[in-house]
């Protein structure tokens, strides 16, 4: 049932009935203003005031692309599930002691549909489209919602084009994604990081499933650092090693199969032994505090009908990423 929570726009009192509009939705016929319409299908259910592009600090770009998944499918439905689940998140965040969403302003773009003329054509199209979106966003923080992990490569390359210095990709993932090609295409989800090594360093955290080919690629490249998942259960030295490998400007790509499948079973290739929620947040908090994160994506949620917890977790993850990105602004520190 809808959360009973505070409003979506500043100035509205608590709403005991749950998720409803704080202002009239646009385009209503005359005489229907003031009724209790549902929240819009935007991230956090923000209305057109709190989610206006002109005043937003962050922009979400849904890219429901799925073509090369190799085991379980369904990532095409990931962006929609994330946005839908986010409408039921409590907006108050204890770390910043305020309702962060309306304070930030988060604009949700329409989903970007890519060509079905093959993976190479789709990735070329995405790189061009992403560059246009990034240009239009200006200083706004752009976070892409996938879709399969192949969509990350064009976004990373487009961000690399925008920054004269070499960027670092922080990849939270169960898999290295360093295959030069997979099942006949170099634009597979399993090749996402191989496509960017010549333009960016890659620090992969949480890895626990790789091929011999990928290990050879990693060992032969000065641009690849792997932090294994089993390191993360011992102490926090893995955090120091990961931070030391990160350059000053970071692109965050978060494949949700990074988490242990007890938390996120709804993904195409779940791997046992993944990290948990609070340790992950501690690491992300440190990354955003000590580095400039220029953009991000969250990918590979494949919703399971009737199982809503993973969708909610990933939506909350997106919210925490945005909070950490703007934590100093939100707290005044």
Image (spheres, helix red, strand yellow):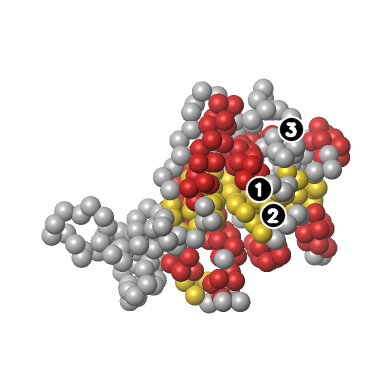
* Location of residue 122 in the rendering, given as x and y in whole percent from the top left corner: 54, 30
Label at residue 179: 3
Q: Residue at x 58, y 60 (%)?
A: 321
Counting every numbered tag in the picture gives: 3
For the N terminus, the quadrant is bottom left
When the figure is inspected, residue 227 is found, relative to residue 93, above or below; the finding is above
For the C terminus, the quadrant is bottom right
Do tag 1 and tag 3 residues touch (Cβ < 8 Å)? no
Q: Residue at x 60, y 65 (%)?
A: 324
* Location of residue 298 in the rendering, given as x and y in whole percent from the top left corner: 58, 49
Do tag 3 and tag 2 residues touch (Cβ < 8 Å)? no
Name the residue beneath numbered marker 2. Answer: 249
* Location of residue 147 in the rendering, given as x and y in whole percent from the top left corner: 54, 41
Residue 22 occupies quadrant? bottom left
Q: CA distance from mark 1 to mark 3?
A: 26 Å
* Location of residue 248 in the rendering, given as x and y in whole percent from the top left corner: 73, 57
Q: Residue at x 80, y 54 (%)?
A: 245
Name the residue beneath numbered marker 1. Answer: 163
Considering every residue shown, the one lying at the far front of the view is 164
Mark 1 or mark 3: whose residue is earlier in sequence: 1
Q: Nearer the viewer, mark 3 or mark 2?
A: 2
Residue 55 occupies quadrant? bottom left
When the figure is inspected, residue 332 is found, relative to residue 219, above or below; the finding is below
Q: Residues within 10 Å of mark 3 (few under 14, many from 20)?
A: many
Specify whether residue 262 is in view.
no
């Amino acid at each position: 049932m809808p959360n009973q929570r505070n409003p979506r726009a500043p100035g509205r009192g608590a709403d005991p009935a749950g998720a409803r509009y704080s202002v009239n939705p646009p385009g209503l016929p005359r005489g229907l203003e003031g009724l209790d319409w549902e929240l819009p299908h935007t991230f956090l259910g923000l209305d057109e005031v709190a989610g206006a592009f002109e005043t937003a600090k962050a922009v979400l770009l849904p890219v429901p692309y799925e073509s090369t998944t190799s085991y379980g499918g369904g990532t095409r439905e990931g962006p929609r599930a994330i946005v839908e689940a986010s409408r039921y998140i409590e907006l108050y965040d204890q770390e910043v002691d305020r309702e962060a969403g309306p304070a930030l302003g988060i604009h949700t773009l329409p989903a970007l549909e890519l060509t079905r003329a093959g993976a190479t054509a789709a990735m070329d199209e995405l790189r061009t489209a992403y560059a246009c979106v990034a240009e239009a966003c200006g200083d706004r923080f752009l976070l892409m919602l996938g879709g399969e992990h192949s969509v990350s490569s064009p976004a990373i390359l487009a961000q690399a084009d925008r920054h004269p210095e070499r960027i670092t990709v922080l990849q939270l993932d169960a898999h290295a994604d360093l295959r030069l090609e997979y099942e006949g295409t170099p634009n597979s989800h399993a090749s996402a990081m191989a496509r960017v090594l010549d333009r960016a360093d890659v620090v992969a955290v949480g890895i626990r499933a790789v091929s011999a080919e990928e290990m050879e690629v990693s060992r032969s490249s000065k641009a690849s650092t792997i932090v294994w998942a089993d390191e993360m259960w011992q102490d926090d030295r893995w955090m120091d090693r990961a931070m030391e490998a990160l350059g000053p400007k970071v692109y965050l790509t978060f494949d949700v199969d990074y988490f242990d499948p007890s938390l996120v079973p709804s993904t195409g290739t779940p791997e046992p032994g993944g990290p948990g929620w609070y340790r992950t947040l501690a690491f992300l908090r440190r990354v955003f505090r000590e580095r400039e994160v220029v953009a991000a994506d969250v990918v590979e949620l494949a919703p399971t009908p009737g199982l809503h917890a993973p969708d909610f977790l990933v939506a909350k993850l997106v919210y925490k990423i945005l909070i950490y990105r703007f934590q100093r602004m939100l707290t005044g520190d």
